[in-house]
Amino acid sequence: NKMAEKVQYYLEQMVPELEDLERKEIFTKEEIKSIIKKRTAFEYALKRRPAQVIDFLKYIEYEMNLELLRKKRKERLTVTKFKGDIKLWLQYIDFAKNEGNNLFNIGLSYSVLQLHPTKPIFWIMASKYEFEVNANIMSARVFLQRGLRLNCDSHQLWHQYFKLELVYVEKIKVRRRILGISNNKDEEFNDHEDSQNFIKIADDDLLKANKLETEGLDRVQEINLDDDNLLFRGELSKVVYFNAIKAIPNDLSFRKEFVNICREFSDIKMVQEEIYESIRRDFKSNPEALSYVIERHVDNISDVHSIEFINSIKHCIDEYQEFIEKFPNYEMWYMYSKFLLKYLHMVSEPNLVSFLNKKLSKTYKNASRSNLASSSMYSDWINWILEKDGVKYEKIKGLLKNATDTWPNNSQLWEKRINVISYFDSNEESESIEELYKLSLKLNPASLILWVSYLSWIFKSINLKDIELENLLLNSISKISSLSQSTHNSKDDKDYQPNEIKDQITTKYLKWAVEKGGLEKARKVYMSLFNKTLPTLKFYQTCIEIEQEYLENSSTSASDPKAHLIWLFEQACGFEKAPIVFTVKLTFAENIQNDNFKESLTIKSLSDGKLLTHFQFNVRIGGIEEGKAFNHYKLFPRAIGQIIQSYNARELHLTFTQGRWNYEDWGYPIVPAAGIGVELWAWLWKDGKLDENWKSLTNALAGLFCASLNFIDDTITVQPKLSFRPEGPYNATELSARAELRYGSLPHENVCTENLTPWIKLLPCKSNSGVASLLNGHKLYDSNFHSMSIHVRPNSECSRKQLEIVQTVSTVVDPVRNSGKRDWSLNQIFGRRLSQACPLAEESKLEINLPEDGDYKLSPDADDVIRNTEGDTSKAVYNLKNVQSKTDVSMTWKEDLFEYNLNFEQPRVYAHRFFTGYGQERGGIKINIFNRSSNISVPIIYFDVIPWFLKLYLHTLKVQINGVEAQYNPIKDLYYQPAVDRSRPNVIEAELSLPPNSITTLSINFDKVFLKYTEHPPDANRGFDIGSAVISTKVESLDDYKYFHDIETRNCSENMPKTACHHFPIRIYTETLLVSLPTPDFSMPYNVITLTCTVIALFFGSMFNLMTRGFVALRPNEVNEDKVKVK
């Protein structure tokens, strides 16, 4: 019927609302059904004929109650889900008050106080509600007392409790005044409500209060309200105050706030005096506290021309002089002078002004005469004299000299002295001002105030020529760059800001250079500054602003400034705050190439006649956003990209090495050569499953490169703390905080063509063209040394991030071995000729380092010969983009036989490691670290991983220098991780400094562990391999940039300043070691088995014979009837 259809229609309109209530868990499913049932009944009742008013009223009442319940549950859900959000609770309380709810009366106060008992604001709100709304002083006190028991050191609670007692007394006073009751004792005044409102501890919990507070509360209870004089004198508030200062005894500002509260009320002078007296008593040697007590006489006097004010000033002066005699110190004299100066500026009556002037002058002179005038006092003294009319220059000049002589390290006094001299004596010679600046900066070398003033002076000086000004600026930069925050005695000194000073000088220098010589001059300046000082973010920002301004205003090609801008922006992005500073998008950002591929081959003759060949392939992609997947694999290998994204790898370094790099004969490799075998280390983001990602990463790489990387388990994996820092031009500190390092190596892994083939497939052109076409596995693995590596690392921390993969192959071949001569050709070395460049390569070249001496011929002629400006070396460069057909490059020598050079220059730092001791039970490890520099101490980091089956003893660690026990400990920092059997290895990391021309020896002893026979490999008698130790340092630490020219050119971009390349890490790997452990006699089990089998066979045969044979009785024959024949 129609009525049912209408009811059904109305109910269907309610469905979205009810579903929303159920989804938000405001009502349960059963409650929703009940609501539908109720509403259905009400709807049918309303549709009856005739309709009854009572049905409408019942329906309205039901909906009102339902809405009220919905609101309450929604509020409860809010504070239930976010119980710890204080702001949310406060908003909830404000909302309830605005809605007119009796907030604390319905139990909310107890709920919030149970959740947040250590938040004073809620105790105060509960107490305030009880006092102001419910007019219940007892409950208000109880709330504050409970709050103080849990938060006895809360300033806010003690102040509110003190204020509550004063407000309560003030309320009684007003009530008595309205009723016309005098303040004397009145028998009729016996308010039953108030008589019950003294501090009474209602709960048993409160009776167990701490002794300090209980004593005070008992004193309050002993006071009878009928004793009006005690009540109105503020005895209750005094008790609260004295208990407060017992709980918080040594806080002057805490006590000052009690005085400020007292000033809001009338007729409580006695309470204030008690507070002042307690401050005087408890802080009798504190100048600030004594000054506060002394100045109480004038604090409440607003009329500075009244007799009362004059008398109060005299009282203050008398008390100041009294305390100065008792406690003569800098602070007391300064407080006194500051007090006189303050009121001198406030008064205008001539006699009083004259009086205060005389007192102030006398105070300054007496303090100076007593050598108790502080630097602040001298500053006020100088300002006071300058404010007076008719100042004599000689007088102020003498005062300034006296001030700077007394406080030579106060830059503000020096600035005042220079400014006053410059202002008063316009004829003062500039040499005199310059001498003052030199003297002040010598005494205050890192004062920002003085440097800013000095810079302003030299730029305004009209007597300086451009060359003189530039020399002054360079000298200033040199001085400030030598400062270090760690060498400053007072690190809290706000004026000590060497970086700010550097920014000021370099910014002004760059802007001056632009004015004088334009962009070219500015570029020369900032490129030279990169080599002389460590740049700051402000410096990069200034350089970028100059380049951008030129780019916007230049009508010529913008390629040059763009290249500089890109490099500057990438370098600036290494700072943590750089993304905030550079919020404006670069106008050239869209033109930056996202993909970039370069390939090169470097050939270098070594001192022993061998030949180093180094292949390097760089692929760089841009536009990578952190936290988002990238699918741009035009040049970047997809296999590597998916691995680093799947397992949250920030950096990845994998190296396959066969043979040991001979540092003494070959110097340092172009890229760090790892130890023998496989080395893997990676920085992984901290995402809650880092160890799981590391394990998955090793498994994925094992499958990709056909290697045994999956054997890098917990017994091999370590977390270096000092070595293997993040590489690449980005914020390494930020990475260390958000990521963790994992390291593992397999020294017994053999490298073969199965590893090389997947490695080549990662290249954009594979081995079809370019220098990769020379990668012949048979020839590579026939070399004395070969190393193959992959390095994946980010290149920036800015909005347009870049990701770079560097693939390298290094080999050392011996052309002398076959013919006795150094002649070589590409066909001889690799068995192949050079083909044309890879079409996808932006740059493809062959570089040959030319020997410094000798008669040789290079064929064909190189496209270019580049000479190293810092030394005598040079290199021939072939641009493979010009090669149209297969080409063979060769070098021939006009000599019959090669003669080894025995006087070649060895590298400054190298190391050797070996075992000591003998036997199968114990032994030791020694490492000799050589520093061949005659005058430079080299800081290094020693890193060594020893397997768990060698138990190291840290107390046996010894350091010797040149064979003698070190007189001092050269180890600056040491990290040691002891091994856990079958779980993790030993790790030693030590930061130490190698003295010049020395051999530093580190040694440590160990015991060998007996392994289970199942833990031995098949070739058990061969022994176990111990991975190489690693010595880490930096190019800049070795201080020989000529020696590392090849390393810098291969690992730095063309536009990058040399100082940026000097931070490149140098890692030196020692020999791998072979340790023999006690080996069980594996023949014994076979002997036991053979013997056992023999015994069993004999026993089994006999028993089997007995058990299978039968004994049968036969008839006796005629010859021998008694014998029985056994058949």
Image (cartoon, grey):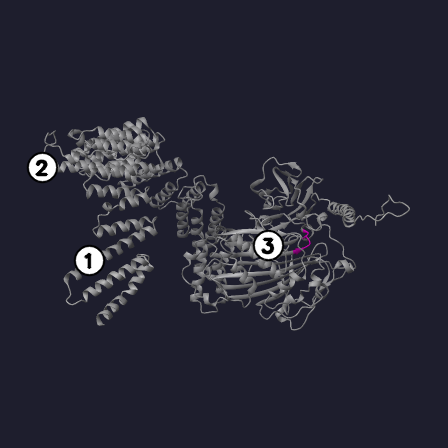
Amino acid tagged 2: Leu
- Residue that badge 1 annotates: 61
Q: Residue furthest right?
A: 1119
Judged from the image, the secondary structure of the residue bearing numbered disc 3 is: strand
Q: Residue furthest bottom?
A: 884
- Residue that badge 3 annotates: 680
Question: Is 512 placed above or below 831 here?
Answer: above
Earlier along the polypeptide chain: callout 3 or callout 1?
1
Q: Residue at x 27, y 62 (%)?
A: 36
| The stretch drawn in magenta includes residue 660 | yes
**Which residue is nearer to you in this view: 1105 or 81?**
1105
Amino acid tagged 1: Glu
Q: Report the Cα–Cα distance between label 3 and label 1.
A: 74 Å
Judged from the image, the secondary structure of the residue bearing numbered disc 1 is: helix
Q: Of circles 3 and 2, which is in front?
A: 2
Q: Residue furthest front?
A: 1118
1122 lies left or right of 352:
right
- Residue that badge 2 annotates: 179
The quarter holding residue 220 reads top left
